[in-house]
């Protein structure tokens, strides 16, 4: 789905590479993450928009042809097992279909949970 072959250096550049409808969703995910963890820093890691907190990866997200991948890392996923049953695609990976409403409330809760894990020192990203 990405139109250019150059790896983006910023989240703005990443989002700009998608059709307008997908850009709108990506921007709303970005706003949701920012609101849930305002102290997190934006960056690009593994060619995906990434938010980092206290030097650790908080969450990643990426757009694909038919879905948005959201990666809150494996820690904490079990805490939301019932809510995530519809979106699970693998350990630490959620798949939000583009033809379905985005679960922004769930994203908000996951980001807050992950931020609490990091602040409490319960995870170290390698």
Image: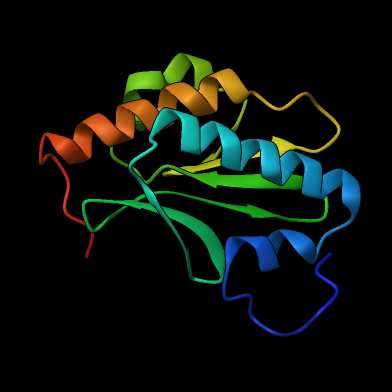
Residue 47 versus residue 86 in the image, above or below: below
Q: Is residue 99 left or right of residue 112?
A: right
Say above or below: 41 vs 38: below
Most extreme residue toward the top, as rendered? Answer: 82
Q: Residue at x 56, y 63 (%)?
A: 48
Q: Seen from this angle, which residue lies furthest bottom?
A: 6
Nearer to the camera, 23 or 99: 23
Quarter of the image holding residue 76? top left
The percent position of residue 67, horizontal first and vertical second, equals 75, 45
- Left or right of 43 on screen, residue 97: right
Q: Which residue, as the protein is rendered here, is positioned at the far front?
A: 39
Instruction: Report the residue at 47% width, 14% height from top.
Output: 82
Q: Would you place residue 2 above or below residue 90 in this image?
A: below
Q: Position of residue 97 (x, y in %)?
A: 76, 36
User: In this view of the protein, which residue sits in the foreground, 104 or 66?
Assistant: 104
In the rendered structure, the answer to whether residue 50 lies left or right of residue 76 reads right
Query: Front-most of 38 and 20?
Result: 38
Q: Which quarter of the picture shows residue 63?
A: bottom right
Which residue: 79% across, 66% down? 17
Residue ID at (51%, 16%): 83
Q: How is the image coloured?
A: rainbow
Where in the figure is residue 26, as x and y percent of width and height?
A: 70, 45
Count of numbered tags:
0
Residue 103: percent from left, percent from top: 64, 23
Where, quadrant-wise, is the C terminus in this rendering?
Answer: bottom left
């Amino acid at each position: 789905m990405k139109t250019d072959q150059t790896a983006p250096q910023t989240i703005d550049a990443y989002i700009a590479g998608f059709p307008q409808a997908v850009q709108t969703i990506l921007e709303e995910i970005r706003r949701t993450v920012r609101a849930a963890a305002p102290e997190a820093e934006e960056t690009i890691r593994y060619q995906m928009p990434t938010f980092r907190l206290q030097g650790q990866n908080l969450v990643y997200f990426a757009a694909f042809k038919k879905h948005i991948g959201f990666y809150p890392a494996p820690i904490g996923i079990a805490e939301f097992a019932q809510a995530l049953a519809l979106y699970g695609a693998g350990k630490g990976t959620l798949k939000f279909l583009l033809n379905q409403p985005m679960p922004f409330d769930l994203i908000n809760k996951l980001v807050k949970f992950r931020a609490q894990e990091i602040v409490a020192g319960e995870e170290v990203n390698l």
